[in-house]
Amino acid sequence: MSNKQTTLKEVTQGTIFLYCIPEFARGIFMVMVTNYLIYFYQPSPESGLPNLITQGFVVLGILTLIGFVKAIGHVIDAVTDPIIANLSDKCRSKAGRRMPFMKYSAIPYALSALLIFCAPNDQPTILNNIWVAVFIWAYFIFYTFYMIPHVALLPEMVREQHKRVNSYTISSFLYVTGSAVGYATPSIVAGFKHAGLAPLTAWRVTFAIFTAVGVVLLLLPTFFIREKDYVSSVVPTVPLLASLKHTFQNRFFCWVTLGQLLEGTAMAFFQACIMFYVVTLLGLPETASVTILAISIAGSLVLYPLVNKLAKRVGKRKPLMAGCVMFAVAQLAIYFAADLPVPPMVKAVALAVFVSFPFAVFNILPGAMLADIIQYDTLKTGVNQEGVFSAAKSFVTKMGHSLAIMIVPTLIVIGAPVGENVGRLGLKLTAVVAAVFCTASIVAFYMYKEDAVLAAIGKSGKEAKKE
């Protein structure tokens, strides 16, 4: 195997950037489905959108339809993650283990994201309910087919720890800038409405443009990166269940994954509710959310070099824990400051600035931390199981997201006026629950012994240089 490794090409910054380009598309689609799905299908009066699906508590008397359907989608996504990961890990295609999955799932992944918002009737019907459910579930399945192999490829291509931090910084930058474009949706929609389009049509045209761009970006690396030029892997032969058991026997993996589960669930609450915070709690127009999110994103990008340097100097765990503390404080501020006699835009901008650091560390460090653990495991076992590790982490965190998406639509109706879908008290409670999850994540990340992992990787690197 060592002879084969010497023939591999060195991964250049250009190759890394090309590999990371799909993250821009992922950012757009994630914002569509995470930030705007509930807003679109459980609309407030201010949105001007019609009710297209059945409203109210329709599942067991405690869950809204959109919350139930999206939660089931996350469960489907989580269950398929290890299956697709195992198939990818064991793939023997001449094009590599990851690229074939990415190439053939790119178009279905993008189209399903768009079709979620294209229910055929302009009023609530059973057909609309079924349509939304089918395409939400399809979106999560094809997301898995594309993203699990994509995420697994980076630890294989980039084996040097500091260069890996740089790679995840680029990846996160593209994801965040893609998300920023997605967050601009209200402004784009407002422009189409000003041009004469109805609100429903304006939202759909905006998402159609995003889809066209996304398809191109998802396909680019599949045509221009030859996976086998950079990767030589030992294909695992153990069954799927045995591989999963192995991942959860790694105590480092378990603590980091638990931390990501709790932190990610807190973030899922925030993303699902941000439009409601802006429009309902603060009484600002939809377009104000663009300004607020632009400030937080710009602030996080400015902090990327600092986070990159901190990760290399003090490790990834400490900055990540600090980010969790700040995000928990920000969520509690939403609850306590919502009714303070302060201009709404001032409160919104203050929140945006404060969450910039948490956004930066959440976007860069968890993925790089997991890649360290995967490399550590490969050094210990001699077998490449990047796909199953990524899928196992994804399975756990998505189950948490499913819980969040089930809870959010149920909470936000608390205190809602008769005939409406959103109440102030319910929105404030979502922030409290998010703060609790984020606080719990601090304990999990504290239990991760990062020094032991990095020491083993550093020792292996020194031995490789001697050889």
Image (cartoon, grey):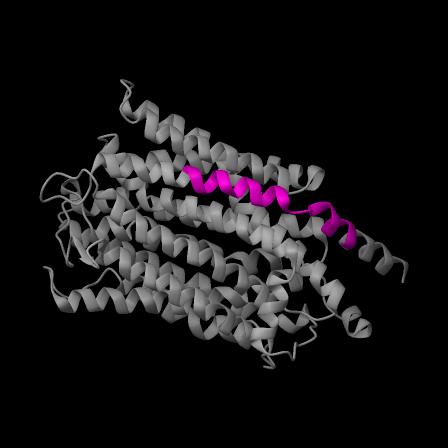
Locate residue 459: give its quadrant.
bottom right
| Residue 435 position (above or below residue 139) | above
Residue 304: image location, x then y, percent? 56, 39
The C terminus sits in image quarter? bottom right
- Residue sitting at x 29%, y 67%: 135
Residue 303: image location, x then y, percent? 55, 35
Magenta stretch contains residue 82: no
- Residue sitting at x 12%, y 38%: 417
- In magenta, the rendered stretch is 435-456
Prevailing SS of the magenta stretch = helix
The N terminus sits in image quarter? bottom right
Q: Residue furthest right?
A: 466
Q: Is residue 299 visible?
A: no
Report the number of discs: 0
| Residue 66 position (above or below residue 184) | below
Magenta stretch contains residue 446: yes
Q: Is residue 7 visible?
A: yes
Residue 375: image location, x then y, percent? 69, 60
- Residue sitting at x 11%, y 60%: 124
Residue 418: image location, x then y, percent? 9, 41
- Residue sitting at x 63%, y 37%: 318
Q: Residue furthest front?
A: 60
Residue 102 left/right relative to 66? right
Residue 328 left/right relative to 290? right
Viewer-closest of 168 and 450: 450
Residue 215 left/right relative to 466? left
